[in-house]
Image (cartoon, helix red, strand yellow):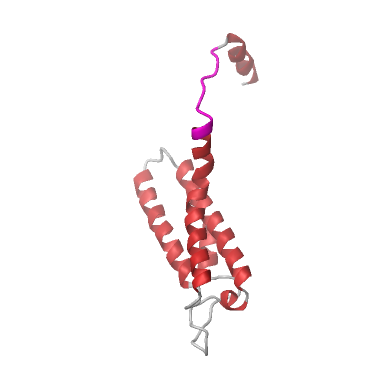
Amino acid sequence: MITATYQAVLSPPGGVWQEDKDQYSAGKSILATKSRRTFLMFIVGNSIGYYASLHMITRLTSGFPLQLALLSLTFCMSINYPVAMLNLVPKGDQTCSVVALISIIFASIAPLLPNLCRRLHFPRQKLPNCAYFRARFASLL
């Protein structure tokens, strides 16, 4: 998933302008100049998918022997993603730039929100140490 979302930034839907023409700049998203609303939906959805995948990878690899190296690489990728995404926005389009930046920031913290809410509202409770439950779960295994 992370590969697909990162690739979508490098090669956005509709492609990018290949040369400077009139009001279009080379390297900017064609979709952003033709349909701003569709481009903004792409940014929001792609950012959520990217950062959710990034957080899932870091959670699944906890305890991995090379975790520090992996975390440093994912940190670098998380810096490159917004830079690449914001470079697709046409020059002078302040609204699109602000919405893109807000969606990238929100999407980067969104995967952390459920865990934070759970910790704030539902503190972890110990289960009763009951012989019935132990026997019941032992029979299931």
Task: Give the overall secondary structure of the magenta segment.
Answer: loop
Q: Residue at x 40, y 60 (%)?
A: 79
Along the line of sight, which residue is nearer the eye, 108 or 81? 108
Can you say whether 17 is above or below 123 in the image? Answer: below
Q: Residue at x 35, y 49 (%)?
A: 69
- Give coordinates of residue 87: x percent, y percent: 46, 72
Q: Is residue 101 visible?
A: yes
- Give coordinates of residue 119: x percent, y percent: 49, 33
Tell me if residue 119 is in the magenta stretch: no
Q: Is residue 1 visible?
A: no
Q: Residue at x 45, y 42 (%)?
A: 61
Q: Is residue 96 left or right of residue 68?
A: right
Q: Residue at x 53, y 35 (%)?
A: 118
Tell me if residue 121 is in the magenta stretch: yes
Along the line of sight, which residue is nearer the eye, 138 or 111? 111
Q: Is residue 88 left or right of residue 141?
A: left
Can you say whether 28 is above or below 115 in the image? Answer: below
- Give coordinates of residue 141: x percent, y percent: 61, 21
Identify the image quadrant of the N terminus: bottom right
Residue occupying the far front of the picture:
95
Number of on-image labels: 0
Can you say whether 5 is above or below 65 in the image? Answer: below
- Give coordinates of residue 92: x percent, y percent: 48, 78
Query: Within the image, what quadrant is residue 76 found in?
Result: bottom left
Residue occupying the far top of the picture:
131
Q: Is residue 90 left or right of residue 137?
A: left
Which residues, given as a range, are shown in magenta?
A: 120-129
Along the line of sight, which residue is nearer the eye, 52 or 99? 99
